[in-house]
Amino acid sequence: MDQLIRLLGYAFVQNAIAAGIVIAIVSGIVSRFVVARNMAFAVHALAELGFTGAAGAILLGTSPEIGLLVGTTITAMFIGALGVRVRERDAVVGVVLAFGLGLGVLFITLYPHYASEALNILFGTITGVSISDVLLLLAIGVVTLVAMAVVYRPLTFATVDPEVAEARGVPVRALAVVFLLIMAAAVAEAVQIIGVLLILTLLITPGASAERLTARPGRATVYSVAIALVCVLGGILLALITNVAVSVFVTSLSFVIYLGARFVVGPTLLGREQRRRDVGAGGEGAAAAS
Amino acid sequence: MAESVAEQNRPVSVRFSDATLDYHDRRVWTDLSLEFQEPSFVAILGPNGSGKTSLLRVILGLTPLSGGTVEVLGEAPRRGNPGIGYVPQHQSFDQDLPLRGRDLVQLGIDGHRWGIGRPSAAARRQVSEVIEAVEATAYADAPIGRLSGGEQQRLRIAQAIVGDPRLLLCDEPLASLDLHHQQEITDLIGGWQKRTGRTVLFVTHDVNPILSMVDRVLFVVNGRWAAGTPDEVLTSERMSDLYGSHVDVIRVHGRVLVVSDSTGSGFELEEPHHLPEIHAGGGPGGGSGSGTGSRIEP
């Protein structure tokens, strides 16, 4: 405990925690929609092509963080332009993913030195972030959150009920592209902590766990953010104490939370929501819920 | 037709003038000229692929006409017209989707607006009232994906009427419901229409569940159409004319059956799902009865 308090005094730890909070909030909100829109594969593609962008940036001698964001954004635009319809989306993602990752391999091969920065991108590097990195993450995070706040309600409508949303004038197609761009920014952020290969632990698991805890959409988003915060901050602290990589703890925590939400806490919480309803509705709802 | 004088003063819900719709290279329907006044309950009938859903999309402002004009509630069609309510074909929600019926209805009020949006107390009361009106209060707080098809459809109707629309569009709302639930949903929509005196356009491939409340019928087949009261349109002569081949319209036990020689099936004629080519002439057979009000293209 003393050790932990001493560690918290270091600037690099404070930077990591500040960055982690921003990243967790963004991931928690975005993951709700990633789950509801079945976009796990797209998230994975964005992350891997973020790696290509970072590798390209390293080759050119510029910032890998910027390269990462450029990579995810270009990929999002490709997916958005080629396949917004669900039916064609997975195929398009696969096509773009394969080609882009090939480019990444090329960039690494061309790089004359051992590409340790590229490896960091693959597995995450949160404890290495400088104050300028934190500011960059913070800026991207704020822009993402503002964009998310603007589209939150129509995006919810377009996600759960696309036909009626379209009939009510919601620009369903345009929102699909906007959400891809938001995902691109969220992925570029989350990769800083957990790396390309483990991206789904922050962009799927919080949303998937939250779904098991409540039937209320707003509450599910709050839960999702809370879960992401626990995973990220818990992961950073455990990593500091044990000297094992952050991503190990973030993935373990999120997995345990998912199992707990699905099999232990979820049934109780959902049950409690239902019971309160049954009291109000004179018990008639029990049959409807079964 | 003593009502003709009164009809002049009734507001027009939808008016088509020489409207034509092409889909890719196919002519879906052509020279559609008709109007529906308030209040009316209109059944839009016809085989699959005859452009019934396209007709709704035109009214919703989602698909532009290829020719002619359409007027919806006195203006050109536009996306998100608040005067229109829309009930889609029944599609189940995912079981684990964190969404209650109450939330679905709420989206009907403000789901199209930007921002995060916490519903006001007034909006919440409005939602509760409409849920009460469709008798869905008992299950409005359950996850919507766990409800039965009939219960989900009730909530969809609540969502469509919560904004007090002047025009309610229903696209096969009875599909995949059993007979009992079909009757419930029909009564719900019919009751709303009678109470409010608004106009309902009800797309269906089977007119029987709604026959008692329908006052106008629009029948679309292979690019041709016929409109009028059910008694005017649903006759052997009119239907044979429209299909371009001999068709019998039989009324048994208060039900209408449209039976053709070739298929031998009831109203849900398994039409070939093709649409007429633009240059293919007037469809199958030698139907020439434009005098009855159905028009034959080109």
Image (spheres, coloured by chain):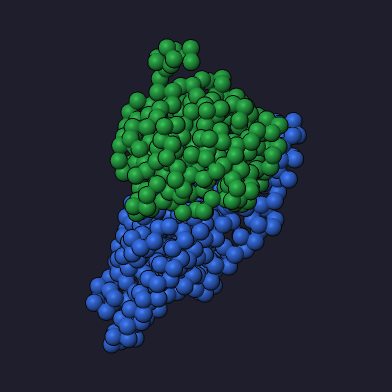
Name which residue lies at 30% across and 69% down.
Answer: A67
Q: Quadrant of residue A72?
A: bottom left
**Residue B285 vertical placement versus B138 (above, below):** below
Along the viewing direction, whichever of A174 and A152 lies nearer the viewer: A174
Residue at horizontal 31%, vertical 65%?
Answer: A74
> Percent position (x, y) of residue B139?
67, 37
Residue A208 in percent (x, y) is at: 57, 57
Q: In this view, does A85 lie to the left or right of B127?
A: left
Please tell me whether residue A221 is drawn above or below residue B129 in the rendered image: below
Q: Which of A178 and B70 is in front in this view?
A: B70
Q: Is B136 left, or right, of A26 in this rendering?
A: right
Residue B254 showing in the rendered view? yes
Tell me: residue B122, above or below residue A20: above
Chain (blue): A
Q: Colour of chain B?
A: green
- Residue B170: x and y, percent? 52, 36
In this rendered view, identify the residue nearer to me: A133 or B165. Answer: B165
Q: Where is residue A252 in the image (x, y as percent from the top left)?
A: 58, 67
Write the residue at 35% across / 63% down.
A82
> From the viewer's perspective, is A257 left or right of B272?
right
Q: Using the rendered view, name the quadrant where residue B225 is placed.
A: top left
